[in-house]
Image: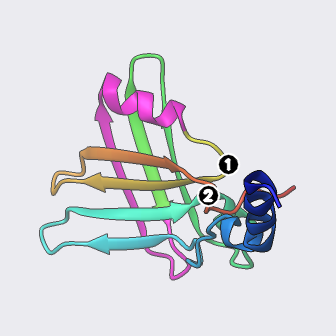
Amino acid sequence: MKKSSILALALCATGAAFAGSKSTATGNVTIAKSADGSGAVTGMLGAIYNGPLMKQYIGCQRDDSDNVLCLALDESDTWVSCSVKSAFLAQSISSFSPDARVTITWNSAGKCTRIQVVHSSEYQDKQG
């Protein structure tokens, strides 16, 4: 048997091992507040949209002057918000997609300090 045939056979036999990793997180909005009022919120947009919980929300908006407003609500009715004028953070909002994982951090004055948008095949796509 040729080496190429053996390699092809080996790849077929182990094909399941190459299946994509899937996040086991629930995707729920997770809010963490510090005593000084700073904090962070994280959520997977597709999993939140597709999930059975009805209240939770996470999102940001920007205007044409690079003013940013981010809001989040978890299932226990805890809500947080932050705002900032930042061309850099406004660009992050432009990369939101229905299947991204979003983390937003803010300081004690309620100013958004970081918006992280992660796109990964591990995260559930928005359905419907």
Measured as percent of width and height from the top left, residue 34 is found at: 19, 72
Residue topped by disc 2: 45
Res 56 → quadrant: bottom right
Mark 2 nearby-residue class (10 Å; few <14, some 14–19, many ≥20): many
Front residue of this view, candidates 120 and 75: 120
Of the numbered discs 2 and 1, the one sitting upstream in the chain is 2
101 vs 77: above or below: above
Measured as percent of width and height from the top left, residue 94 is found at: 52, 30
Amino acid type at circle 1 is Pro
Secondary structure at badge 2 equals helix
Amino acid type at circle 2 is Leu
Front residue of this view, candidates 67 and 122: 122
Front residue of this view, candidates 93 and 62: 93
Q: Which residues are magenta?
A: 73-95
Q: Going by the image, does 100 lie left or right of 78?
A: right
Q: Is residue 4 magenta?
A: no
Numbered label attached to residue 98: 1
Image quadrant where one finds the C terminus: bottom right
Q: Going by the image, does 11 lie left or right of 116?
A: right
